[in-house]
RNA sequence: GGUCCGAUAGCUCAGUCGGUAGAGCAAGUGGCUUUUAACCACUGGGUCGCAGGUUCGAGUCCUGCUCGGAUCACCA
């Protein structure tokens, strides 16, 4: 094992050598090249991030009036001063602004944009000044002579802070006229192509930071930028949390490291606890813990967190994925479908602003969810199918699943493949269970929870014998869970919603890797040696 | 795991029949400075994923490997 040198990690090339030289020259001007802070103003109401200023109504209003003025002008004609000046007076009256961000282009011109990852704002530096430099000496002392000198030393991608006043350009873009310039941090590595961003999916996923920078510098992008995808993901998740809390649910955290991998049919990751000298499994589902809490009196409970399954990786599978699971006492499968539908509608509305979502060319309509039994669904797409408990799932996967584009609840599952669900009182071979499909993909799975401890025990025993017959994914008996149910669990319904897949649908992304910040990948190997550690 | 596709400059990509390694952006020097993919001129920059093989000669053909993507199987 050898510790790599810095140069082995950041290999020098013409780009880094030039940036190293620039950093040295900047250091001579400003002192510390990695200062500790930059205080932003609050002209926009809150802290003046670039995004906050960009959406500040007073700036937007000037830009729209300027657009009207320009609409009355010919090609290449400059807006007359008597119309432009009042707008500039208005902007200047907002006072001094201090903003910070990353340079989206080299500073060869005197107009450049800064980005905060989401938005860009143009800044303007005039060679003739006045343009002061703010030294990083802890006192923020001013050097009125060397502002332009610093400007010329800056590289594409460097982080700077500027102070100045707002104005509108002849082309109608509100910008900051920089009076003071402060160096904040260096980009030692070059920026990606500003037209194309990062094309290599491997680099995008391994170096998500670089992908995020690239998409924030990009001039145009088809669909959402990487940053916008994850902003939307955050919105979906927070809207779901709010919805559940508004309906009386409480969030809990149950074990991720568990002595038994149960609650779902899947292969687990195994690990070892040294002090206790026992094997533990990364949880495949929180289900049985959450229902223990229902036994204990949490009538409405949810957990939104990661599950781990040691199975294949595909465009819709990542070894760790985010699941929202919740349980509601005294509710049955019908009530749960209604609640789920309402929650998803709200979430889609909040995240996308509407209920129609375009996914890979299909218009998905979230305003109405279909409901159809598994048997009827099979007969709809394959009228000649011979359906029994054994063939049902296979027929469903083959003929029905790919056709379920619009949100559809499939109901009435065979009981034999639903070991934790209650049977339908009218037909004991059918489980009161549903799965929600959208765009051919399973998004949610819910049921009326089996709360009879003796029947649950029998179902576990059936699963264990499946296991002995070689089904590695048959469910494991959990004795403590039987004991919990024996204290009495109220009738209840529960559901698990695959958050990553929902985010895929709402961001029009084909791969689960595009909606997980750091998806699972093989570890990188350096050339010529084994990975250390 | 199977099948197919890909890996060339920091980034995005060309590279014909096997015959001197190319462009744009980025970088360096100089000019210009109300531009918005800024522009103009010049310059530097390559282990063609890795290891073999065929050949007078391989980015190009063959074999193996690594990593990635698509897809199928399993799964949510």
Image (cartoon, rainbow, N blue to C red):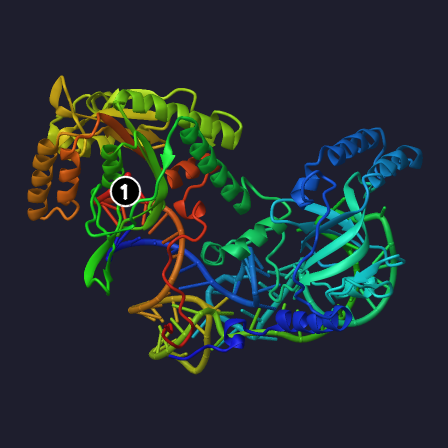
Q: Residue furthest top?
A: A426
Q: Position of residue B6 (x, y in %)?
A: 44, 58
Picture quadrant where residue A487 is located = top left
In this view of the protein, can residue A234 be seen by the observer?
yes
In the image, residue A425 above or below residue B59:
above
Q: Position of residue B68 (x, y in %)?
A: 40, 56
Quadrant in which the C terminus of chain A is drawn? bottom left
Count of marks placed on residues: 1
Q: Residue furthest right?
A: A82
Label 1's element? loop
In the image, residue A157 above or below residue B70:
below
Front residue of this view, candidates A332 and A154: A332
Q: Chain of mark 1?
A: A
In the image, residue A52 above or below residue A10:
above
**Going by the image, does A136 lie left or right of A260?**
right
Q: Which residue is mark 1?
A: A286
The residue at 46%/35% (across/down) is A506
Q: Position of residue A3 (x, y in %)?
A: 44, 78
Q: Residues within 10 Å of mark 1 (few under 14, many from 20)?
A: many
Q: Position of residue A79 (x, y in %)?
A: 88, 36
**Going by the image, does A503 lie left or right of A104?**
left
Front residue of this view, candidates A134 and A76: A134
The residue at 61%/45% (across/down) is A118
The residue at 21%/48% (across/down) is A261
Front residue of this view, candidates A340 and B46: A340
The residue at 50%/42% (across/down) is A229
In this view of the protein, can residue A77 be seen by the observer?
no
């Amino acid at each position: 094992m050898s510790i790599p040198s810095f140069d082995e990690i950041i290999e020098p090339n013409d780009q880094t050598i030039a940036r190293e030289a620039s950093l040295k020259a900047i250091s001579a001007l400003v002192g510390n090249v990695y200062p500790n802070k930059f205080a932003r103003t609050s002209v926009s109401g809150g802290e003046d991030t670039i995004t906050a200023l960009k959406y500040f109504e007073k700036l937007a209003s000037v830009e729209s009036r300027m657009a009207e003025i320009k609409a009355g002008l010919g090609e290449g004609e400059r807006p007359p001063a008597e119309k432009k000046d009042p707008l500039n007076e208005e902007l200047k009256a907002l006072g001094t602004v201090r903003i910070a961000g990353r340079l989206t282009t080299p500073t060869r011109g005197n107009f450049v944009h800064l980005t905060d990852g989401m938005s860009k704002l143009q800044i303007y530096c005039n060679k003739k000044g006045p343009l002061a430099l703010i030294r990083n000496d802890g006192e923020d002392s001013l050097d009125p002579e060397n502002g332009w000198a610093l400007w010329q030393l800056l590289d594409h991608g460097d982080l700077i802070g500027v102070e100045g006043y707002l104005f509108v350009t002849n082309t109608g873009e509100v910008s900051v006229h920089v009076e003071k310039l402060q160096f904040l941090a260096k980009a030692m590595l070059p920026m990606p192509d500003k037209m194309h961003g990062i094309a290599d999916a491997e680099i995008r996923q391994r170096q998500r930071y670089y992908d995020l920078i690239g998409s924030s510098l990009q001039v145009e992008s088809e669909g959402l930028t990487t940053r916008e995808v994850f902003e939307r993901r955050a919105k979906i998740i927070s809207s779901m949390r709010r919805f559940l809390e508004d309906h009386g649910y409480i969030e809990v955290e149950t074990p991720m490291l568990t002595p038994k991998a149960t609650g779902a049919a899947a292969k687990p990751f195994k690990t070892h606890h040294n002090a206790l000298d026992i094997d533990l499994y990364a949880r495949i589902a929180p289900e049985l813990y959450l229902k223990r809490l229902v036994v204990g009196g949490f009538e409405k409970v949810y957990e939104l967190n990661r599950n781990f399954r040691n199975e294949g990786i595909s465009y819709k599978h990542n070894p760790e994925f985010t699941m929202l699971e919740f349980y509601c006492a005294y509710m049955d499968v019908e009530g749960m479908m209604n609640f789920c539908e309402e929650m998803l509608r709200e979430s889609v509305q909040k995240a996308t602003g509407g209920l129609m979502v375009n996914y890979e060319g299909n218009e998905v309509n979230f305003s109405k969810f279909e409901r159809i039994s598994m048997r009827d669904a099979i007969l709809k797409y394959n009228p000649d199918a011979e359906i029994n408990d054994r063939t049902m799932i296979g027929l469903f996967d083959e003929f029905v699943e790919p056709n379920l584009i619009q949100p559809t609840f499939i109901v009435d599952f065979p009981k034999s493949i639903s070991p934790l669900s209650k049977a339908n009182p009218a037909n004991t071979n059918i489980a009161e269970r549903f799965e929600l499909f959208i765009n051919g993909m399973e998004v949610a799975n819910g049921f009326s929870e089996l709360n009879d401890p003796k029947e649950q025990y029998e179902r576990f025993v059936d699963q264990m014998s499946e296991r002995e017959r070689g089904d590695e994914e048959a469910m494991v008996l959990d004795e403590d869970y039987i004991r919990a149910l024996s204290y009495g669990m109220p009738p209840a319904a529960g559901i698990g919603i695959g958050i990553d897949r929902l985010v895929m649908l709402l961001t029009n992304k084909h791969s689960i890797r595009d909606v997980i910040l750091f998806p699972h990948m093989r570890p990188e190997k350096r050339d010529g040696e084994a990975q250390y550690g």
